[in-house]
Amino acid sequence: MVKNAQAHDFFQQLNQDLRHSAFGLPRLILDEDQLKRNIQHAEQQLHKNKHLKPRLVVKSLASLQLLQTVATHFQTQRFMVFHLPQILPILESFSSADVLMGKPMPASTVEYFYLRFTSWNTSNIQWLVDTPQRLIAYLDIARRYAVRLQINIEIDVGLHRGGVSSTQELVALLKIIEAHPEQLKFSGLMGYDAHVTKLPSIIKKADVAYAESQQIYQHFIEIIQAQFPQLWHEELCLNGGGSPSFNFHVKQSVCNDLSFGSMLLKPSDFDSTHLEALKPALWIASPVLKVLENTELPGMPLLNKLPHKDKALFIYGGYWMADYVYPKGAHPHLLYGRSSNQELVNVSKTTQIDVDDYVFLRPTQSEAIIPQFSQLYCYKNNVFEAWETFRE
């Protein structure tokens, strides 16, 4: 009841502040106070494992001002980037940016970067590689553009989304890197383990899945140490994690580099017992355009005559990857259908809501929602500060 009352008070106040300051469009709202509480909790957890260096996932925090705020708190300039257009703002805005690509890029994408942005040819970018074919294509680019590419190798630690899964595959890649020291530099490994907390416990408990993923990771480390000692050094980037497995890594990890981002905003896809100390900090606010006492379905006059327990709202926009959270019980109509223009939202007849009030939704993901809005509105002390997002 306390939580429900707090949520009611928060959204009531947010609604009033939006009505007084907004210009009647859907807005993406960042609750700065909750963001900072989430950051503080994450910092406390990271102190448990001080050899882990934080790496911020850009796609999940896709606003330069947001990234600057979070990077300052964690005292890091390590970033994981998944989208080529997002590399340049990071390099331009952070003087010591350390960029690790979060997925293997097409060779044409890598070539475009070195062709288009020649002034950044010596920037600190680790390109992710998963196969010998991709590595050979990158080698050809390095030769043609006279650059030395840092190569991080993607390993499969149980997610089964590609990447090196055998000793033979890893050895083949390392031999190519070792044979071309002027063009290629081995920078480390990346093993994403989101499956650890996503598997139903009836199939495998999270702690067991995590232990297995760590054993696989350790096996690949030992191969490098034993067979390629000249490539091994303590400064290699041994990246792991993701928000879902954050709490496992901070307790014990073979990695020294930990990626996370979404959990700081806590969209609903990250609701789990492992992240329950973190609370939602990201909301969509949408103005109410129309308030109707009943929902009337086209072509169904008999059904429309039945008693109605809900009133109908039509809002500005809709059909986001998000769930309605306020007013309490708000939901799309099962039969009327969804709309990204004017979505029908049902609320209880007793709900006090008027045209130009706002309904609120909680995104399921931050990476899918943030780029849909040109600005992220940081909300603190009843005031909104507009932060630009990475829309491209």
Image (tube, grey):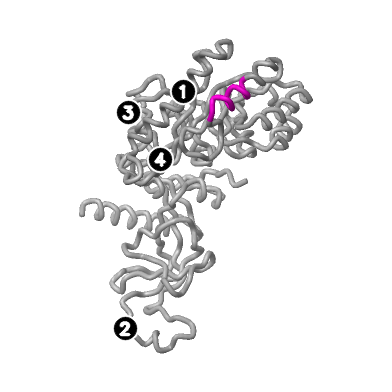
Q: Position of residue 140 (x, y in %)?
A: 75, 27
Whether residue 327 can be seen here: yes
Residue found farthest to the top: 230
Identify which amino acid the numbered label 4 is placed on: Met
- Between marks 2 and 1, how big is the CA–CA gap? 65 Å
Question: Which circle's residue, 2 or 1, is located before the other in the chain?
Answer: 1
Identify which amino acid the numbered label 3 is placed on: Gln
Whether residue 63 can be seen here: no
Q: Residue under circle 1?
A: 219
Q: Residue under circle 4?
A: 263
**Please, is residue 317 above or below residue 370 in the view?**
below
Q: Secondary structure at mark 3?
A: helix
Q: Residue under circle 3?
A: 44
Whether residue 24 appears in magenta in the rendering, the answer is no
Q: Secondary structure at mark 1?
A: helix
Question: Which circle's residue, 4 or 2, is located before the other in the chain?
Answer: 4
Identify which amino acid the numbered label 2 is placed on: Pro
Mark closer to the observer (2, 1): 1
Q: What span is colored magenta in the figure?
A: 166-174
Q: Residue under circle 2?
A: 307
The residue at the point 69 percent across, 16 percent down is 179
Q: Secondary structure at mark 2?
A: loop
Task: Kindly indicate whether the residue at mark 4 contacts the one at mark 1 (C-beta within 8 angstroms).
Answer: no
Mark closer to the observer (1, 4): 1
Q: Position of residue 146 (x, y in %)?
A: 76, 21
The residue at the point 42 percent across, 37 percent down is 243
Question: Which of the 4 image quarters holds residue 17?
Answer: bottom left
Identify which amino acid the numbered label 1 is placed on: His
